[in-house]
Amino acid sequence: MAVWIAVLATGIGCYALKLAGLVAPQRVLSDERVRRFTALVPVALLTALVAVQTLAHGRVLELDAARLSGLAAAVVALLLRAPFLVVLVAAAVVTAGLRAFGV
Amino acid sequence: MDSQRRAAVRDGLGVGLAVGLSGLAFGAAAVAAGLGVAQACALSVVAFTGASQFALVGVVAGGGNLLAGALGAMLLGGRNALYGLRLAPTLGARGWRRLLTAHLVIDETTAVATAQPEPRSARAGFWATAVSLYLTWNLATLFGALGAARLGNPETYGLDVVGPAAFLALLWPRLVSGGTERVVALLAMAVAVATTPLLPPGVPVMLAAVAALAGVVRRRRTPPARRAGELSKA
């Protein structure tokens, strides 16, 4: 029962946060600086997420060679202007391949 | 449908299917942690934000305090509020549609929507990602919880790198073309990585928002941008 309460509380809390951003009065966006800030927020948070998902396990920083190589393969694919799905496949194939060889 | 919107839908479907498959890992982790199949599925249906779900399940697995676990999960969900602020003018949802749209404002939909050059393709990308990811994530959670883990650890197939690779690919054009964006990105990564060992999971990524503030300050030193007319920009 306690787990059910935690599950539902998490769901409701996460939903409330999502809604809060959408219903915030648009007046706050009339300020040029606020607009610049919100435009740059996804860049900041998503690159931070890429770094944390690649380099951290919980609160521990770790260098997972297979995962790092997969991300490096994605960067190479991007530099070669590969299509989006090719980038994803390249990353997964390199990571899975290295793990198959025990890296 | 014009080519820009087709490209946005294609990217969205790709993200939705690829990232959604990691729901297998979530379902398996949830059941291994002691959640029932129904609880694992309920969490994916009502929370629908992967990082928060994994956080709660981790606390359950570790036998930790459930209240603290739920609060930690919400902390991780805090960034969705910032995404909503950014996406609200683009999505333009009103009334009951806004209540539905809000549930879908997460990392993946924001990444695809904000990678598009104009509002119409941004909306197309948002909805393509939202629908495909919601369906895939919830189905994958169910299969993962029912024992698809016997197929092996999703990390074996390199699925853990798909999320970061997708975000990087979607941000790439902005990182290549914008000096301010590059500075913000590097600063954000430095802040998040440096504070990861010190703060609860979720906080470092939220804290990286200060990098966006630095971008605002940097922009003000250059000649002022056009003020009128920018509001409609995606």
Image (cartoon, coloured by chain):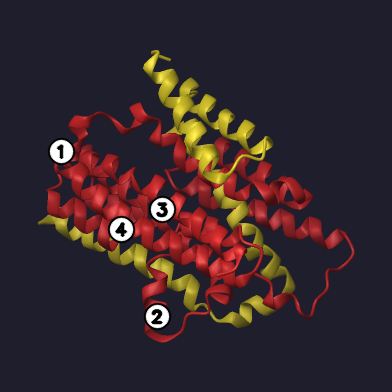
Chain colours: A yellow, B red
**Residue for badge 1:** B147
Output the chain of dot 3: B
Q: Earlier in the sequence, mark 3 or mark 2?
A: 3
The label nearer to you, 4 versus 1, is 4
In the image: residue A34, left or right of residue B163: right
Contact flag, marks 4 and 3 (Cβ < 8 Å): yes
- Whole-angstrom CA distance, mark 3 to mark 1, is 22 Å
Q: Position of residue B187 (x, y in %)?
A: 67, 43
- Whole-angstrom CA distance, mark 4 to mark 3, is 8 Å
Q: Earlier in the sequence, mark 4 or mark 2?
A: 2
Q: Earlier in the sequence, mark 4 or mark 1?
A: 4
The amino acid on which the numbered mark 2 sits, given as a three-letter code, is Arg
Q: Residue at x 41, y 57 (%)?
A: B77
Residue B48 visible in the shown view: no
Label placed on residue B135 = 4
Label placed on residue B118 = none
**Residue for badge 3:** B16
The residue furthest right is: B223
- Whole-angstrom CA distance, mark 2 to mark 1, is 36 Å
Find numbered disc 2 in the image and state the secondary structure of the residue it sits on. helix
Q: Nearer the viewer, residue B19 or A13?
A: B19
Find numbered disc 4 in the image and state the secondary structure of the residue it sits on. helix
The amino acid on which the numbered mark 3 sits, given as a three-letter code, is Gly
